[in-house]
């Protein structure tokens, strides 16, 4: 019985020390080809991106259920995959996602077509790309990347099923496991918020005062500035305040020594 109780205690201690983060998203809006705005914060994939024109961050990921087909993807920045001279299709230039089978490269996603949307089935944010229009189908292939928040993973792309045909267009579903797929709230400090609020109120006060003085009182020149006399005297008031504070501190801090000297 004692061993059993210890086991339950150990399980309880381990359980309470394992942080579990559950995101309850309800919307996902495109900010850029790198960012998705959600009601839980912003998803920013820029830390996963390799520089433009270099090799993609996620290279030759095998597509589940389709032998010989792989997909490469680089977040944010365009890249180009070199093609063999004997290739029939050489379409992976300045793209986001490239599909490769044998020696042929297919454009299956361009950076400028990036779109974020909320998938109600899996309750996750999805980043979608549209590729080049192919004449034989008159359709564009599309790549769908479900963004899965995983605080323990830098970045892992996996195929979550074979490519599907929808209206003669190939759809490629993937899932990205990454800590950068986790929504993050704005990191503004309380001081920053106060400064922004104060600055906004000050600007509103000046603009409203100028409009009131100009159109209601008919003021012209510098007289349109609200409380102009106060603002003209403000530097002198600050100077007097600093001088008074200095003299007060000098007198207070040096008072004890002065009393000894008088004795």
Image (cartoon, rainbow, N blue to C red):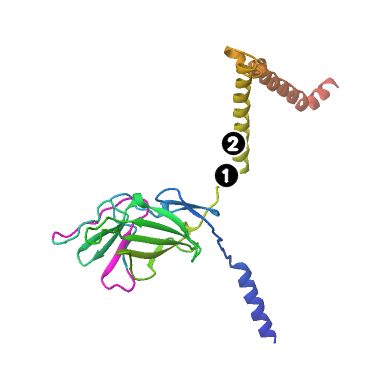
Q: Which residue lies furthest to the right in this view?
A: 263
Residue 241 screen position, x and y as percent = 70, 21
Q: In which quarter of the image is residue 63?
A: bottom left
**In the picture, residue 145 is in which quadrant?**
bottom left
Q: From the viewer's perspective, is 262 left or right of 60? A: right
Q: What stretch is highlighted in magenta?
A: 63-85
Mark 2 or mark 1, which has the lower sequence index? 1
Question: Which one is nearer the viewer's eye here, 245 or 107?
Answer: 107
Q: Main secondary structure of the magenta part?
A: loop
Magenta region includes residue 78: yes
Mark 2 burial class by Cα count in 10 Å: few <14, some 14-19, many 20+:
few
Element under label 1?
Answer: loop
The image shows residue 85 at horizontal and vertical percentages of 14, 59
In the image, farthest residue toward the bottom:
1
The spot of residue 69 in percent (x, y) is 27, 68
Q: Please tell me which residue is depicted at 61% across the width and 35% down the height of the picture.
A: 195
Residue depicted at 29% across the width and 66% down the height = 70
Q: Quadrant of the N terminus?
A: bottom right
- CA distance separating discs 2 and 1: 10 Å
Which residue in the structure is indicated by mark 1? 188
Q: With respect to residue 7, does 165 lie above or below?
A: above
Q: Is mark 2 on a helix, strand or loop?
A: helix
> Mark 2 touching mark 1, by CB under 8 A?
yes
């Amino acid at each position: 019985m004692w061993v059993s109780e210890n086991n339950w205690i150990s399980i309880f201690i381990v359980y309470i020390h394992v942080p579990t983060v559950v995101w309850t998203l309800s919307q996902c809006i495109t900010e850029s080809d790198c960012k998705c705005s959600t009601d839980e914060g912003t998803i920013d994939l820029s830390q996963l991106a390799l520089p433009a024109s270099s090799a993609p961050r996620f290279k030759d990921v095998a597509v589940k259920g389709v032998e010989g087909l792989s997909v490469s993807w680089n977040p944010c920045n365009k890249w180009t995959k070199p093609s063999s001279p004997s290739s029939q299709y050489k379409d992976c230039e300045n793209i986001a996602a490239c599909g490769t089978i044998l020696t042929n490269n297919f454009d299956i996603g361009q950076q400028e077509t990036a779109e974020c949307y909320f998938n109600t089935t899996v309750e996750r944010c999805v980043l979608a790309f549209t590729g080049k229009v192919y004449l034989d189908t008159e359709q564009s292939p599309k790549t769908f990347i479900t963004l899965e928040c995983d605080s323990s993973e830098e970045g892992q792309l996996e195929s979550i099923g074979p490519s599907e045909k929808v209206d003669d267009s190939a759809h490629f579903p993937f899932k990205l496991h990454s800590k950068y797929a986790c929504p993050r709230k704005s990191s503004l400090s309380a001081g920053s918020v106060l400064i922004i609020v104060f600055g906004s109120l000050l600007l509103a006060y000046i603009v409203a005062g100028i409009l009131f003085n100009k159109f209601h009182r008919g003021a012209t020149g510098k007289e349109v500035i609200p409380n102009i006399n106060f603002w003209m005297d403000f530097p002198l008031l600050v100077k007097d305040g600093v001088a008074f504070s200095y003299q007060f501190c000098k007198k207070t801090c040096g008072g004890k020594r002065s009393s000894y000297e008088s004795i």
